[in-house]
Image (cartoon, rainbow, N blue to C red):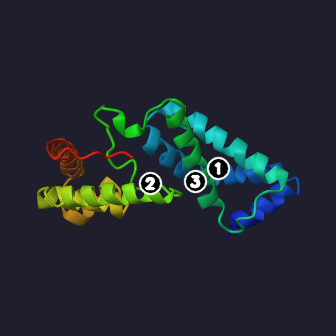
């Protein structure tokens, strides 16, 4: 049985010159970080670019000796990626939720960390408005939204928990998002800060 080395130990090994330790860290967190970035930008190439930029920043910080988040490597890396995503949208003068494609994501603002007090108040209002709108949806759509967004369940898990097919769960999610968009427009709710 192979013992998995902790992230903090791998960081130490890397700082001491073991380049392989960084490869292990990148491989270990690749899918989680890629999924996180893609959920915000909805573009494969841009996801790859931001992923690479994130680890360039990680490596530079470690080489400078400026890393001090012992044992919290992944949240630190996620914060770096999150900041790079925000920088990208600022540079391009658009926030992800202005993207009016079928994969439009009105929840893109719900998990943002590190906001200043004013933005936090606005975010709280947006979250409150969204929760109120969700309550207007049919129960089956509310259930799928809640499981997917707040419990981070896969559609397979949602299917197993609700006793419906994966296609039915996907359909309910799709209709929930369509109905939410209609409610947002009908109530003139602004979902950006």
User: Residues at badges 2 and 1 in contact (C-beta under 8 Å)?
Assistant: no
Location of residue 88 with respect to 20 vertically, above or below: above
Q: Residue sitting at 19 percent across and 46 percent down?
A: 171
Q: Tell me: 81 left or right of 102.
A: right
Q: Which residue is mark 3?
A: 78
Residue pictured at 71% horizontal, 53% vertical: 24
Whether residue 5 is visible: no
Q: Is residue 54 left or right of residue 143?
A: right
Q: CA distance from mark 3 to mark 2?
A: 20 Å
Q: Please state if 148 lies on the left or on the right of 83 as rendered.
A: left
Of callouts 3 and 2, the N-terminal one: 3
For the question of whether residue 145 can be seen, the reply is yes
Q: Quadrant of the N terminus?
A: bottom right
Q: Tell me residue 184's x, y (percent).
A: 20, 45
Q: CA distance from mark 2 to mark 1?
A: 34 Å
Snapshot quadrant of residue 129: bottom left
Disc 3 and disc 2 in contact, CB within 8 angstroms: no
The residue located at (17%, 61%) in the rendering is: 135
Secondary structure, mark 1, is helix
Which mark identifies residue 64? none
Q: Quadrant of residue 136?
A: bottom left
The residue that disc 2 covers is 119
**Which numbered disc, 2 or 1, marks the residue that appears first in the sequence?**
1
Badge 2 density bin: few <14, some 14–19, many ≥20, Cα 10 Å: few
Q: Residues within 10 Å of mark 1 (few under 14, many from 20)?
A: few
Depth check, mark 3 against mark 2: the one in front is 2
The residue labelled by disc 1 is 27
């Amino acid at each position: 049985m192979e013992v998995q080395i902790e992230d903090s130990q791998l960081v130490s090994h890397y700082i001491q010159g073991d380049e392989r330790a960084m490869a292990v860290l990148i491989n270990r967190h690749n899918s989680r970080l890629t999924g996180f970035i893609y959920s915000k930008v909805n573009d494969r190439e841009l996801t790859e670019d931001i992923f690479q930029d994130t680890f360039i920043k990680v490596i530079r910080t470690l080489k400078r000796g400026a890393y001090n988040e012992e044992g919290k490597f992944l949240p630190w890396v996620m914060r770096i990626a999150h900041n790079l995503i925000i920088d990208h949208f600022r540079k391009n003068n658009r926030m992800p939720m202005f993207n009016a494609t079928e994969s439009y994501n009105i929840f893109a603002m719900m998990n943002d960390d590190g906001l200043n007090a004013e933005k936090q108040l606005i975010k709280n209002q947006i979250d409150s408005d969204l929760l109120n709108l969700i309550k207007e949806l049919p129960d089956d759509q509310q259930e799928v939204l809640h499981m997917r967004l707040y419990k981070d369940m896969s559609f397979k898990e949602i299917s197993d928990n609700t006793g419906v097919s994966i296609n039915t769960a996907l359909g309910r999610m799709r209709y929930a998002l369509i109905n939410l968009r209609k409610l947002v427009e009908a109530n003139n709710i602004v979902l950006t800060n």
